[in-house]
Amino acid sequence: MTLPVFLADDLLVPSAAALRPGDAARLEGAEGRHAALARRLAVGELLDVVDGAGLRLTCEATAVSSAGAELLVRARREEPEPRPALVLVQALAKGGRDEQAVETATEIGVDRVVPWQANRSVVRWQGAKAQRGRAKWQALVRAAAKQSRRARIPEVLPVLDSRGLAAWVRGFADEGGRCLVCHEEAVRALTAHLEELGADLGRAAGIAMIVGPEGGVDAAELEALRAAGAVPVLLGPHVLRSASAGPAAAVLVSAATGRWSRARENGA
């Protein structure tokens, strides 16, 4: 059984990175109260404390109060950054479907999220709203990463418009990444494309999955993305909503890269 995960932000130490097996620490703040009151952590129980950048500390609770818990570090593990990195480029969508996609894709294992204000996006992030939207998505991936017991919290990049996304795709490809545009009119199936890439898939610096809004990716956007180096792919025989297309692509890419064939380290 996996251990519950808490974030290191509320550890009363200068740096979680300095802790070693045998060291003591105290978990307070929101994480400490959640451990004590919501999770009902008991003395002697084990838990993981993660810093969001790959550090996982397995700790034993030595004392618990309503304010938090005293901890004894039992083990320390640095989890390497996965390669290739998985990136979800998610178009802004109405009805919270974009947030649903980001949350589920984080649980599946994406490493970065790029908000995209597509031409057909009904939701618009402009000015201060762009900052609030990005902060909301970052809080969302933070909670989803914690729930799914991840030691790494995905980064949410600033929102891009369609011209900015084409430039980002070009740079991503120049750095050895591969970009896939999920499109209902694509001829090549994603599964077939992944099979064609074979070993080259694992050698890629990253794999980006681009998902459009409710109205889809328009012709001009598709052409610009294709010219920048992206490949249009078909997810399957059915048209998926913006909320489900990204997670579906993430599952297929995770399986093809071997991510889902590796044993989980922190638990059975």
Image (cartoon, grey):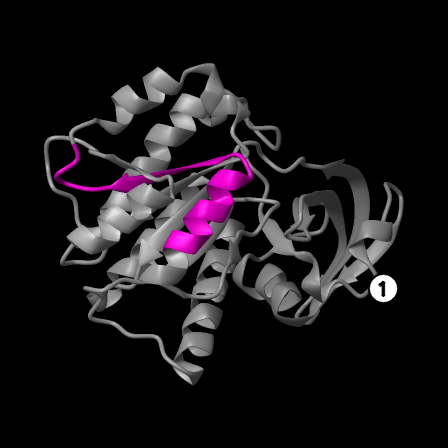
Answer whether residue 65 is visible to the viewer in this image: yes
Q: Residue at image x 26%, y 20%?
A: 192
Residue lying furthest front: 227
Camera-side residue of 152 and 162 = 162
The residue that mark 1 highlights is: 14
Residue 232 place in picture, x, y as percent? 25, 37
**Count of picture labels:** 1
Indicate the amino acid at tag 1.
Pro
Residue 95 place in picture, x, y as percent? 21, 67
Classify the position of the C terminus by image quarter. top right
Q: Is residue 188 left or right of residue 36?
A: left
Seen in the picture, residue 86 relative to 189 is either above or below; the reply is below
How many other residues sit within 10 Å of disc 1, few (<14), some (14-19) or many (≥20)?
few
Q: Residue at image x 78%, y 37%?
A: 75
Residue 106 place in picture, x, y as percent? 44, 48
Badge 1 marks a residue whose secondary structure is loop
Seen in the picture, residue 46 relative to 94 is either above or below; the reply is above
Q: Residue at image x 34%, y 23%?
A: 194
Seen in the picture, residue 125 relative to 148 is either above or below; the reply is below
Camera-side residue of 59 and 243 = 243
Q: Is residue 81 left or right of residue 227?
A: right
| Span shown in magenta | 166-186
